[in-house]
Amino acid sequence: MTGDVLAADEPRPPLAIQFSLDRPIDAAAAPFVLAAAGGLFSAEALAVTINIASGSQDAIARVAAGTSDFAVVDINALIRFRDKDKGAPRIKAVFMLFNKAPYSIIARKSRGVLALTDIEGKTLGVAEGDLSARLWPAVANLNGIKLKSVKQSSISAAVREPMLSAGQIDAVTGFSYLSAINLRDRGVPADDLAVLKFADFGCEAYGFAMIVSPALAAAKPEAVKAFVRAVIGGVNLTIKDPTNAAAEVASRMDGGSKDLELERLRSILRDNILTSEVKRNGIGAIDPARFERAIDQVGEDFKFQKRPQASDIFDDQFLPPLNGRLIN
């Protein structure tokens, strides 16, 4: 054999892939962790290196710059990023991991917040960069809540749970699987917490999705399909054995707790991944009509230069057929 030509029966070398998570590893990353640990990426001839970005905007920027091939990001952050950043218009999501966004208001019942309408007249802590807060105006409008009647207090993410547990604020915006479980871990009784998930109050938003480099998608579409297949395999492994998945995740965290990540993972599977839509239509896809409504809701707190269509944001051509996406 000469040059770089492979013999017909010789295996191809794995394709090196850089993959960005938009935040440090926690239970939400379980499908990717298990796809790597279980050899699913390598079985698809992919050599995947996972790196950690400082948020969805950073992860999207890495894909836009070509320093990452894939990233997992909040789909609603992608919608906003593509509209304002001229370097990102061609970036699309190719796989939807969270069929429902985890956006929530987490409140103390002992502070008088038992239902969403109780938030009027209360103090709501909003951390800088919190994605839940960006959909709060749409949810408030849907449910007849006067935004001006809610006192918003800007706080850092580091003090969000401590301030609520200390009773310095009445409620916070955040992710249901993060803030609510962090508060219980801090000793706040579960029966004193009201977890008001936006999805239960008319929020149409999808959540975390996988995006891909346009250059890789154009040059190596089969590699994109292979990556998606491996992630679906990771989702199925996570669902089959959440306890093992949580242990794998915790082992990759600095001081991670297997029990805490298992609680998070069960919350994620129940509320964000294994929805009725996913059970009916398989994992990874979107409902275009619902996604159009979700884009409209994003627009209630964001002025589009040009409102995108669902097909501008999500590309389903790399998904396997339905029978390859049904949850086992």
Image (cartoon, rainbow, N blue to C red):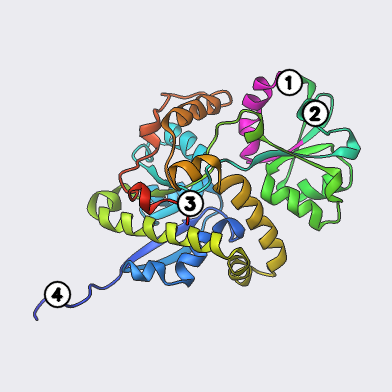
Mark sitting earlier along the chain (4/1)? 4
Q: Are marks 2 and 4 in contact (CB under 8 Å)?
A: no
Q: Earlier in the sequence, mark 2 or mark 1?
A: 2
Q: CA distance from mark 2 to mark 1?
A: 8 Å
Reading the image, the residue beneath label 2 is 119
Check the image and name the residue furthest to the bottom. Answer: 1
**Disc 1 designates what residue?**
145
- Residue plotted at (14% across, 75% down): 6
- Give, as a single range, the part of the protein colored magenta: 125-147
Q: Nearer the viewer, residue 259 or 299?
A: 259
Residue 8 part of the magenta-drawn span: no
Is 260 placed above or below 22 here? Answer: below
For numbered disc 3, what is the local secondary structure?
Answer: strand
Q: Quadrant of residue 153?
A: top right
Indicate the secondary structure of the residue bearing disc 4: loop
Q: Which of 179/88 is in front?
A: 179
Q: Is 144 one of the magenta-colored residues?
A: yes
Is residue 257 visible in the rendered image? The answer is no
Dot 1 or dot 3: first in sequence order is 3
Q: Amino acid under label 3?
A: Val
Q: Please state the horizontal and vertical placement of residue 108, each as a whole percent of the image.
A: 85, 40
Frontmost residue, 148 versus 107? 107
Q: Is residue 298 above or below residue 164?
A: above
The residue tagged 3 is 72
How busy is the neighbourhood of tag 1: few (under 14 within 10 Å), some, or many (20 plus)? some
Q: Position of residue 263 (x, y in %)?
A: 70, 58
Which amino acid, by three-letter code, is at mark 4?
Leu
Q: Which residue is mark 4?
A: 6
- The amino acid sitting under disc 2 is Ile
